[in-house]
Image: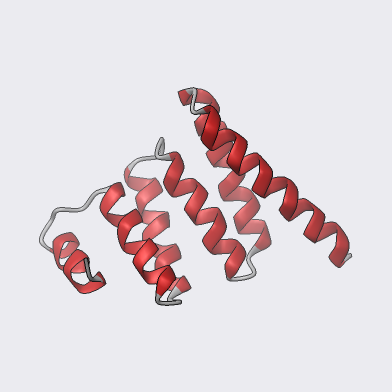
Amino acid sequence: MQAKNLEKMIESGHDSALLRLTLARILIRQNDLADAATHLEKAVQLDEAYTAAWNELGKTRRLTGDTAGAAAAWSRGIEIARQNGDKQAEKEMNVFLRRLGRVIRRQR
């Protein structure tokens, strides 16, 4: 599916966290990270319990160099995953958060 088709769906009122996540992933592949982050932020507003969107938001922020934003997204995603019993998402985001911490320590 193309980004324009998904944007039209959003504009017509068929907005959802899954739609935003899908659109963001397409935009990431097109290297449009800023717009992808915007759609991911909207995705977690629409469904705060959507751990996949929190994880992708952390990754996208990391790619843009926003380490604090990435850490915040993954930290919140970990909290949500724990609340939902989503062990796999919790583990994955913990790994990304630890790696990010190592990168930050090396930069000091």
Residue 106 image position (x, y, % from top left): 87, 62
Q: Residue at x 44, y 44 (%)?
A: 52
Residue 57 image position (x, y, % from top left): 49, 55
- Farthest residue toward the left? 12
Q: Is 24 on the left-hand or right-hand side of 67?
A: left
Q: Residue at x 52, y 62 (%)?
A: 60
Residue 14 image position (x, y, % from top left): 14, 53
In the figure, 99 relative to 36: above or below?
above
Q: Residue at x 81, y 54 (%)?
A: 102
* Quadrant of res 39: bottom left
In the figure, 55 relative to 84: above or below?
below
Question: Which of the pair 39/91 is nearer the observer?
Answer: 91
- Farthest residue toward the bottom? 31
For the N terminus, the image quarter is: bottom left
Question: Which of the pair 76/2 is nearer the observer?
Answer: 2
* Quadrant of res 94: top right
Question: Which of the pair 95/71 is nearer the observer?
Answer: 95
For the C terminus, the image quarter is: bottom right
